[in-house]
Structure formats: structure tokens, C-alpha cells
Amino acid sequence: MQPAIFLDRDGVINENRANYVRTWEQVVFLPGVFDALRELAGSGYVVVVVTNQSAIGRGIMTAEALDDIHDRITHRVTQEGGRVDAIYACPHRPDGGCDCRKPQPGMLLQAAADLDIDLASSYLVGDAVTDMEAALAVGVLPVMVRTGRGIAQLANLEAKGLDGVMVTEDLGEAVAWILDDQPDLASRR
């Protein structure tokens, strides 16, 4: 089994949009993201994006359009020297009752089964309380970034009594903290 870094997409890798990121042209990478993903590329962690994308369930975009965006994100990250090993997306509406939409941990569990991931040695970096809840539900270490919705969501961490959440400025700081927390991982692989 291998550890993973799970990353939320909107607000962690790219900017959030009020009406959803529906096309490649609407993808705006956040500052420092490529540097952070380059750091992860040689770290010994599997890099997995887990993202709620209810625009599909709402009929605002197609699954094919989402696949195109994800293919292009993966390609661009690779061009910049980083790596994304897999992307899992929940297409359901919040009222859909599925087990994959965060805060449910279904995407994390599916990735763990598919990629032989050790959840207890893994981290999830997100910008929402629902990301932190999904991580904590399966023993993944949660890291909240202040980018995206992060600043607005910080008060909700306390309100929900979510302890043990590391808070960082952005993905770069989160990756630096994780790699400092587990500095010998790359040498064990």
C-alpha cells in the first residue's frame, strides 16, 4: 500500500467560479500550484484529485466536457513537471443521495481500492469543510487551504467541532508542511 495526497480541484488547484468551471478556457491555475505539484512529483505520494462537480447533475455541463478539462489539467501539470495520477469526480447534485459527493468519503474509498492507497498515511488538501469531513471519515489527515472558499470556511471548522485540521495559506504551503511532516517517505519507496 502507498500513501496519497488527495487534492480538491476548485479553490486548491484552480480558481473557483460562481457558475462552475465549465470549459478549459475558464480554468485559471492558482499561483504556486505548478511548483507545489512539481514538489509532489518526486515525493513518493500518489497524487489524486477528488472533486465535486454537480454542474453535470444540474445539466449545466456534460461529462465529456468535464473529462476534457481534466485531461487538459493533467497534461498541463505534466508539462510543468508535476504529476496527477488520477482524478475522481462526483457528478451528482447535493441532494442526489450518493456516497461519492464530499463530505461522503466515497471517492477516497474508491481511489484507495483502485490504487492500493493507505488512507491512514494519506493527506487531503481542500478549501471546504466538506473536504475535511470526507478526510476525517476515513482517517485521512486533513489540510485546509485559505485559497478558494477556505477563508470563509474557517469559522465552519470550529462550528462543526472539527479538530486536527492543519490550516495553510495555499497548496504550496500545504505541500511543504506535508513533506516536512513525512520527510523520509521518498527514500522508503
Image (cartoon, helix red, strand yellow):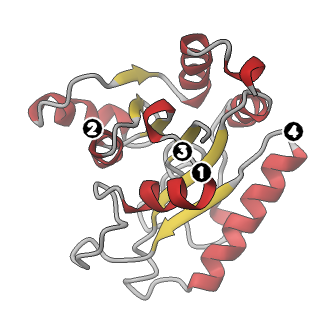
Label drawn at residue 81? 4
Question: Which callout, 2 or 3, points at the residue further toward the start of the chain?
Answer: 3
Closer mark to the observer between disc 2 and disc 1: 1
**Residue 25 horizontal/vertical position (percent):** 70, 66
* Residue with the most extreme front position: 1
Q: Secondary structure at mark 4?
A: loop
- Amino acid beneath label 4: Gly
The answer for how far apart the CA atoms under marks 4 and 3 are is 17 Å
126 with respect to 14 (left or right): left
Quarter holding residue 64: bottom right
Label drawn at residue 153? 2
Cβ atoms under marks 2 and 3 closer than 8 Å: no
Closer mark to the observer between disc 4 and disc 1: 1
Q: Residue at x 33, y 57 (%)?
A: 102
**Residue 5 horizontal/vertical position (percent):** 57, 38
Label drawn at residue 7? 3
Question: Which callout, 4 or 3, points at the residue further toward the start of the chain?
Answer: 3
**Residue 90 horizontal/vertical position (percent):** 44, 70
Q: What residue does disc 1 label?
A: 116
141 with respect to 79 (left or right): left
The answer for how far apart the CA atoms under marks 4 and 2 are is 31 Å
- Amino acid beneath label 1: Asp
The answer for how far apart the CA atoms under marks 4 and 1 are is 24 Å
The answer for how far apart the CA atoms under marks 2 and 1 are is 31 Å
